[in-house]
Amino acid sequence: MKIGIFDSGYGGLTILDKIRERLPEFDYIYLGDNARAPYGTRSFEVIYEYSLQAVRWLEQQGCRLIILACNTASAKALRTIQQRDIDPERLRVLGVIRPTVEAVPAIMQTGHVGILATPATVSSTSYVLELEKINAMRGDGKQLVVEQQACPMWVPLIESGEHMDRGADFFVDKYLSELYSKDPQIDTLVLGCTHYPLLIEKIQGWLTSYALNGGIHATPICQGGIVADSLSDYLRRHIDIEQALSRNGTCRFVTTESTTKFCDSASLFLSTAVEAEHIELPE
Ligand code: DGL
């Protein structure tokens, strides 16, 4: 049996990459619903419906464990899928928000946290609620200040391969300036969308010039390594699932878009050549 990794598009490749580095022995299926990306500007109903179609398809392909490597799907669809749509004896579906939030306390310095995410993730308030829960559990009375910023243009820039161009600078500056105008003290910046690590150079550049102009130097948090560590820990705690997984070190790439377009972009993101298959997700 395999591990399924699902995202609306290319963003989940940033998670897959780190998971395969950490757990290279297992067999993976990466599914990108590129034809219908972005999800982040869609309604709850549509995000849930598309995510469930992807989960069902990956289950049919022999996945025993599926990671929604998509914050938007994790925020809007994960809980309903876990509670209503799957039999946990046959399939487990995990998200990326909880492990990310668990990593924040060790990184934050003053309790000022910024969340960058899609409009859907921001409107779900999942990050804010999970961070408040974790902070209450820690019980050291440290004040937590969380501000969110929706970045609706970042995913389209990445999906269209425009994210390294100068035009992208405008939108990096726009959203980071808006976030820091809400709280200039943010020292921990969660990239709460799996696409955003592809903009890390531009984000780092903005943070450096903010610090050079007298602001705080914030630490950005990318999710890949965090999710990989959390999956490894999960498999240690769920030996039955770990033992059911096949170990040939393979990865099958599947997209709902054209395979040529997917392979060109995925190869860039993973810095290795990729072959992909086209599918249509049954409704
Ligand atoms: N990469 C996804 C996320 O982590 C979704 C981006 C989108 O489709 O809008 O939120």
Image: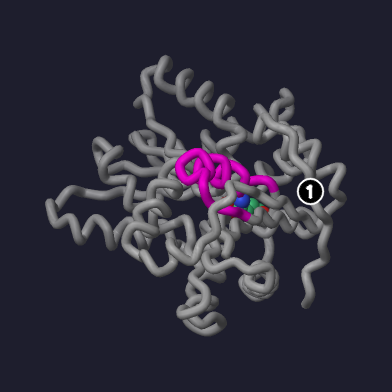
115 relative to 156 in the view: left or right: left
Instruction: Find residue 255 and report its horizontal and vertical position in percent.
Output: 77, 55
In the rendered image, which residue does mark 1 sit on? 276
State the scheme by which the image is colored: one colour
Q: Residues within 10 Å of mark 1 (few under 14, many from 20)?
A: some
Q: Is residue 49 above or below residue 96?
A: below
89 relative to 151 in the view: left or right: left
Camera-side residue of 29 and 207: 29
Instruction: Find residue 71 and report its horizontal and vertical position in percent.
Output: 54, 56
Kindly indicate the quadrant of the structure image that contains residue 113. Answer: top left
The furthest residue to the top: 212
* Range shown magenta: 10-28
Ligand 1: does it lie within 8 Å of the C-beta at label 1?
A: no
Q: Is 196 one of the magenta-colored residues?
A: no
Kindly indicate the quadrant of the structure image that contains residue 188. Answer: top left
Please say whether residue 123 is visible from this viewpoint: no
Camera-side residue of 273 and 98: 273
